[in-house]
Amino acid sequence: MRLTARQAHLRVALFLGLFLAVHFATHFAGLGGIESHGAMLSIGRGVYRIPVVEALLVTALATQVFLGITLVRRMAQWPRLDRWRKAQKWSGIALAVFIVLHTSAALGSRWLFALDTNFNWAAGTLTIAPLNYGFAPYYAAAVIALVTHVLAALHIRRPARRHGPALLLGPAIALPILLAYGGALFPVELPAAHRANFQTYLDLL
Ligand code: HEM
Ligand code: HEM
């Protein structure tokens, strides 16, 4: 059986959806505090940190970005794109940039700098000024792009009026997550290792 790029992209999306469900469950657990975040993080890591699973996850992400770029390039030959197609294209491009930066930052921090990429890792970028001025829109854009991309996929397969207003789910999901990591819901005290790590970025500014 030969899969088209679009069919392959859909299958990889279903696999990545499993990771993303666990990833966002961890972000939402963070609304209840650093301890509940840690508990959910350990459950997720118990699965996606198994070396073969993590290798599959990173390969799936690289494949998805590669397939996505192929699909975007094909769209260039289409006579015109309607609004949902444009949303699919630009949210895909935003996701490509975010996936490359975010995955390499997570793996690089862990492997090269031996930093625990736990609650404090995301919180460091969202509590320390001026890093938070860049990272808050960066994370918000990623969540909005993901929600837009999936809604565009649903709409293109089966149009429904509710998909337009459902785009508000993007900011509605991003905001509480950013408030929790940003220290607006409960006090966040960064451990020395995380403070020192972010200080190196501040020294570069
Ligand atoms: C987390 C990563 C991603 C997920 C979960 C995802 C999910 C999806 C899904 C479910 C579809 C609909 C497929 C179908 O209906 O058969 C789709 C289509 C599409 N995606 Fe993605 N995608 C991701 C990343 C990307 C990236 C990084 C790009 C671009 C660089 C991209 C570009 C596209 C394009 C252009 C289409 C429309 C394909 C067509 O109809 O010809 N996607 N995506
Ligand atoms: C509010 C937005 C987000 C925040 C604050 C965030 C935060 C984090 C944190 C703290 C980790 C480390 C997890 C660990 O050590 O187990 C991580 C890893 C990761 N995140 Fe996110 N994330 C966000 C959105 C996303 C999105 C939208 C995607 C994909 C489209 C994504 C994909 C990943 C991947 C692939 C990893 C690496 C997993 C691994 O192999 O260890 N994240 N993120």
Image: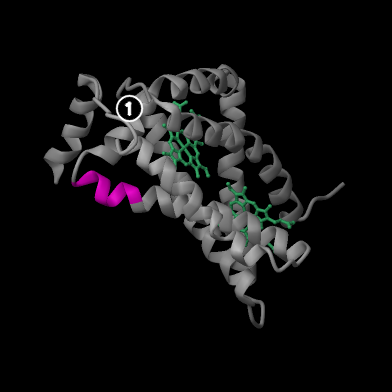
Q: Residue at x 62, y 30 (%)?
A: 56
Q: Residue furthest bottom?
A: 79
**What is the span of residues highlighted in magenta in the rendered image?**
130-136
From the viewer's side, name the closer residue of 97 and 123. 123
Q: Position of residue 106 (x, y in %)?
A: 40, 32
- The answer to whether residue 123 is magenta is no
Q: Secondary structure at mark 1?
A: helix
- Residue at image mark 1: 120
Q: Residue furthest right?
A: 1
Q: Is residue 172 above or below residue 51?
A: below
Q: Is residue 173 above or below residue 81?
A: above
From the viewer's side, name the closer residue of 129 and 74. 129
Q: Residue at x 32, y 31 (%)?
A: 186
Question: Is residue 96 at least partly visible in the picture?
Answer: no
Question: Is residue 116 at least partly visible in the picture?
Answer: yes
Q: Main secondary structure of the magenta part?
A: helix
Task: From the viewer's perspective, tell me whether residue 56 is left or right of residue 30.
Answer: right
Q: Residue at x 37, y 31 (%)?
A: 108
Amino acid under disc 1: Asn
Image quarter of residue 38: top left
Image quarter of residue 181: top left
Label total for image: 1
Quarter containing ligand 1? bottom right
Label 1, ligand 2: CB separation under 8 Å: no
Q: Residues within 10 Å of mark 1 (few under 14, many from 20)?
A: many
Q: Position of residue 100 (x, y in %)?
A: 45, 45
Task: From the viewer's perspective, tell me whether residue 3 is left or right of residue 180.
Answer: right
Task: From the viewer's perspective, tell me whether residue 16 is left or right of residue 136.
Answer: right
Q: Position of residue 147 (x, y in %)?
A: 57, 53
Q: Residue at x 63, y 70 (%)?
A: 84
Q: Position of residue 88 (x, y in %)?
A: 60, 64
